Every structure is written in structure tokens, then in C-alpha cells.
Image: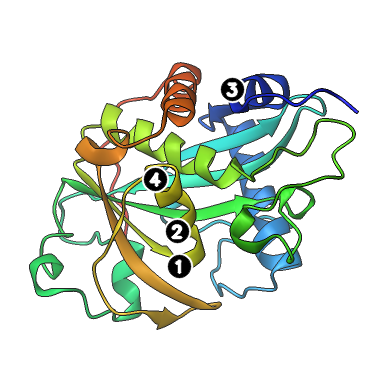
Amino acid sequence: MMPSMDLISHYHNFFYVTQADTPELLEIAYKLRYEVYIKDCGYEFHNPYASDEIEKDNYDKCSLHCLLFHKPSNTAIGYVRLIPFQDNNTYHLPIEKFGIQFDNEFNKKIRSPEFGEISRMAIHPSFRRRLSDRLYLFEDKTDTQGCRFRVNYLPVCLVLACGVLMNDNQLEYSVALMERKLAVLIKKYGVMSKKIGESISLNGIRSPYMMKTREFNANLNTEFKKLYDIIHQELKPDTLTNDACH
């Protein structure tokens, strides 16, 4: 058995994050989304952009996309996107389509250039925890190759990547539809989120949460602050474009 590694050493050995900003990387991203959401989870999005085993929608053209790669196999095993709000007559954030009753202070606030939405977060099924691993925080005694760490921190890597993009693209807030267990997980390591509206049934029970950029990494524990800085170095964010979405 390999000697146990700290989180940063484990990340350096096995993973890295990159922005998917080329046609080749975007194709990898869309195929990973199809693999996770359509084939593994059986979700049905009913949009005309999905074909040939890819999953995409009309928000992708103005999104900032990130891929999480497994170094030993050079395979993309995680994905997330950040959709900045753009102030024009036709654009809205995807979260607005579900008729969610937001808390009064957020009914109009999310329709501003200060906001973005985190969505389509996905981890390949071969890298997700077993169902018995409660809240992804189960001590794994079976790791003989160093591929599993004592906690499943891969979803946190994707959330931290969005925090980097929020900061570098001058977005003050982000919203996301999340299961409660993900909100609990990221809070455990210091990513603070606030529930801002009613829960809905959407491939399970999900609730709208908001994160503030200024508070994003302020409460991270020491290891995850280091991880945030590493991911910040790995990403080379582009400036936002003015492409309209509708």
C-alpha cells in the first residue's frame, strides 16, 4: 500500500484543472456531460443541441467551462461551467426557468451583471464514491493504488474552479441549484453558501444557493486555501465576451 498523502500531494499526483476554451476541449466536455447526465443518471434535458453522444445547450456559447483531468490516464473526469449574467433584453440565467420562489431580496437581484450561475457540475461515475460513502466523507480502507483519498474532494475542486472564474471575471455572486449534501460538503471545507429560495424536484430535491465571491475562500481551511491557489494558477481565465444568449 502506498503511504498516505496529504490533500495537496494527492491532487498534484493525480489531477489538474483546465479551462475548456478550444473546440477540442469543449467536445470532451460535452461528451463527459452526456456520459454522466444522459447515460449514467438517465436525465432528459430535451434540447435540440444534444446529438452524437454530446450534451450541450444554448447557454454554452457564453459560458466559462472547466475540466478536471486525471493525470495518470490523461482523461477528463470532471466538468463544471459558470454562466455570467449578461444585461440585455433576451438573456436570463437557467435557474430562472424553473419558477422558483426566491427570497424577496433576490427576486430581481439575480438579474444583474454582478451574478453568474454554476451549473452542469459532473464527475465521471468511475470517480464518484459508492452510495455507502455517506456525504462523500467515508474513510476508504481499500485504496491500494493511491487513487482514492480519505475524502472525495473532487466536487470541491470544481466549485473552487468556479470561485476562481468568479473572482477573475469580477462577478460578485453566483447561484446554483444544489442537493443539500453538496452544500453540506463544501461548507465543511469553508465554501459558504446561502439557501435563497424554495426547494424544487429536479432529478431529485434541489435548492437554490448563493455564494459571494468576497467570502468564497475567506473561510477555507489551510489545505483547501492551498488547493484554491493551485487551481488559480492552473486556470488562465479569459475576459468575458459580449456574446448574447437567449
Q: Residue 206 placed where, x, y %?
A: 44, 73
Depth order, front residue of 29/91: 29
Q: Which mark is residue 8?
A: 3
* SS at mark 2 in the image: helix
Q: Residue 56 placed where, x, y %?
A: 55, 56
What residue is rendered at 24% in x and 50% in y? 85
Kindly indicate the quadrant of the structure image that contains residue 217.
top left
Kindly indicate the quadrant of the structure image that contains residue 220.
top left
User: How far is the residue under mark 3 from the one under mark 1?
Assistant: 26 Å
Q: Residue 204 placed where, x, y %?
A: 54, 78
Query: Circle 4 is placed at which residue position?
Result: 82
Depth order, front residue of 31/67: 67
What residue is rendered at 53% in x and 37% in y? 157
Q: Looking at the figure, which quarter contains the N terminus?
A: top right
Mark 1 neighbour class, 10 Å CA radius: few under 14, some 14 to 19, many 20 or more: some
Query: Circle 1 is placed at which residue position?
Result: 180
Q: Earlier in the sequence, mark 3 or mark 2?
A: 3
- For the residue marked with disc 4, what is the amino acid? Leu
User: How far is the residue under mark 2 from the one under mark 4?
Assistant: 21 Å
